[in-house]
Image: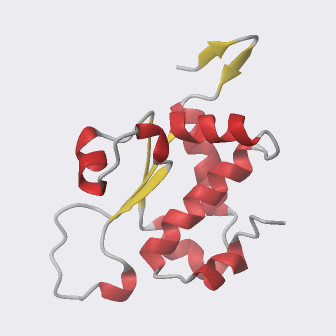
Amino acid sequence: MAEQRAGWTAPDQADFLAMAEAARAALPDAFRAAAAAVALRVEDFPSEDMLDDLGIDDPFELTGLYDGVPLIEKSAFDQPDRPDTIWLFRRPILEEWLDRGNVALGELITHVYVHELAHHLGWSDDDIAVVDRWWE
């Protein structure tokens, strides 16, 4: 459900998921299949377990998280205990978007999504820059 604030409605989890799925669909062909194999979840905040595992106290400090085994570390003999997942955290992303004030929300969601996908694909910062020209 979308939140109401000062005359505008914040996008809800379904809206965020749609924007993240659009970011995935816009990836270059070479990466789209690998990205499609990663589950995509949107929650308002990271769980306490996630924060504890990362040593983070403030849930607003975490906008996204990749949970899985990067492709460059996978083996055909691995028996995964859960699917590789990219988590996007709606409230921290909204907070960053409001604080920045100079970027479209869809662009910020794309940036967080691509950064987390980079963990799955084993990309360097230079590899990320090919897909996400964030600084331009």
Q: Quadrant of residue 115?
A: bottom right
Q: Quadrant of residue 44?
A: top left
Residue displayed at 79% across by 47% down: 103
Residue displayed at 23% across by 88% down: 76
Q: Is residue 29 left or right of residue 63?
A: right
Q: Say if 54 sits above or below 47 in the image.
A: below
Residue 124 place in picture, x, y as percent: 55, 83
Q: Looking at the image, what colour scheme do you see?
A: secondary structure
Quarter holding the C terminus is bottom right
Residue 49 place in picture, x, y as percent: 23, 45
- What is the total number of numbered labels drawn onto the structure image? 0
Q: Is residue 68 left or right of residue 9?
A: left
Residue 104 place in picture, x, y as percent: 78, 44
Residue 15 place in picture, x, y as percent: 61, 35
Q: Say if 50 sits above or below 25 in the image.
A: above
Q: Nearer the viewer, residue 45 or 86?
A: 45
Residue displayed at 59% across by 65% down: 114
Residue displayed at 70% across by 77% down: 129
Q: Say if 9 sits above or below 114 in the image.
A: above
Q: Nearer the viewer, residue 67 or 34?
A: 67
